[in-house]
Amino acid sequence: MDFRYYIQRFSYTSSIRFYKIDIGVSNASYLLAAADKTPDSKSLLAMQPLSLSTIRDLLSDISNNTKMPVPDLRSFDDSLARYPFHYLLLRLPSPNAQSLSSLRSSGALTPQQDALLDLKLGTFIHSMHSLQNDWFGVPGTQPDEELESSGEMQKTLVEDIRRYPSRAIGSFLFEDAEVPTLVWLTGSADDVYVQISEPCGLNQEARVDIAHVLPTFDRVVWGDPMLEAFFMSPGPSKVLKEGYLEGEGGTLIIFPRQRTKRM
């Protein structure tokens, strides 16, 4: 058997490494997330990357309860019994998908295709924000370890970085969200993968669809949904906002203080 494979490594944090594995004989692609150890919950840094076990649970929740297309979980092990690292193995639905950022930078998308992808992306983000929690903070921690409000959570995070200036920021700055939702926080066009299919007929554009998003969920929080990176300057496109609002009308308003929260 001619068994050929290709491994591509990329990483978003110092603690979790991602490897894309393409297996030629079966035309299958997998994503391996590997971490040396579980992040130290007692660390002085407030925003520690989530453990792979917590990311596994989030993937299951997102897959079962939202429209966000995430890869299928195939294997998980954090015992260190067989390998000297924790890992998640995920099956990618499309081996030939390309990142949305690369398609845009290369000019491969028509305005109509780009708008369609933004519309779907807005719908997916809105769906993910339907996941709600009883308290603000970091997934995978117990309620009694968490903070009672978005303001307290944000002020604690800022104090770790800007110890004294943060005390000058009034609590009103962070009291925008009544119910904490699951916020991707670092999601970008680099994490959105698009499948391009052959056009249905002559003189028609190739079909495009969002195949999956990379599970770069190690920085997600329960917080204000307006903190999403997709909503930051220069702001979401009109079509993405339409998808997020799902045709219900209304206005997606991003205040300057939302950008302050993302410091």
Image: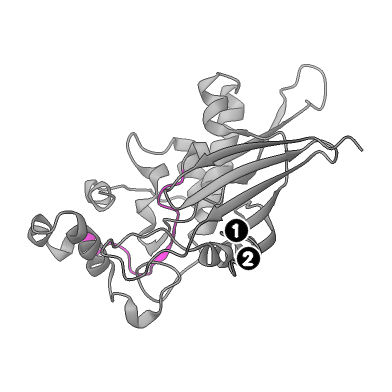
Q: Circle 2: is it few (<14), some (14-19), or many (20+) Cα within 10 Å?
A: some
Task: Give the mark count.
Answer: 2
| Secondary structure beneath label 1 | strand
The magenta stretch is 174-187
Mark linked to residue 87? 1
For residue 94, above or below residue 88: above
Residue receiving disc 2: 77
Which quadrant holds residue 115? top right
Q: Amino acid at mark 1?
A: Tyr
Which quadrant holds residue 22? top right
- Residue 250 can be seen in this image: yes
Residue in front for this viewpoint, 41 or 182: 41
Residue in front for this viewpoint, 23 or 148: 23
Quadrant of the rendering where the N terminus is positioned: top right
For residue 260, above or below residue 44: above
- Residue at 34% x, 42% y is 232
Residue in front for this viewpoint, 134 or 200: 134
Verify CB contact (< 8 Å) between mark 2 and mark 1: yes
| Secondary structure beneath label 2 | strand
Mark linked to residue 257? none
- Residue at 12% x, 62% y is 170
- Residue 246 can be seen in this image: no
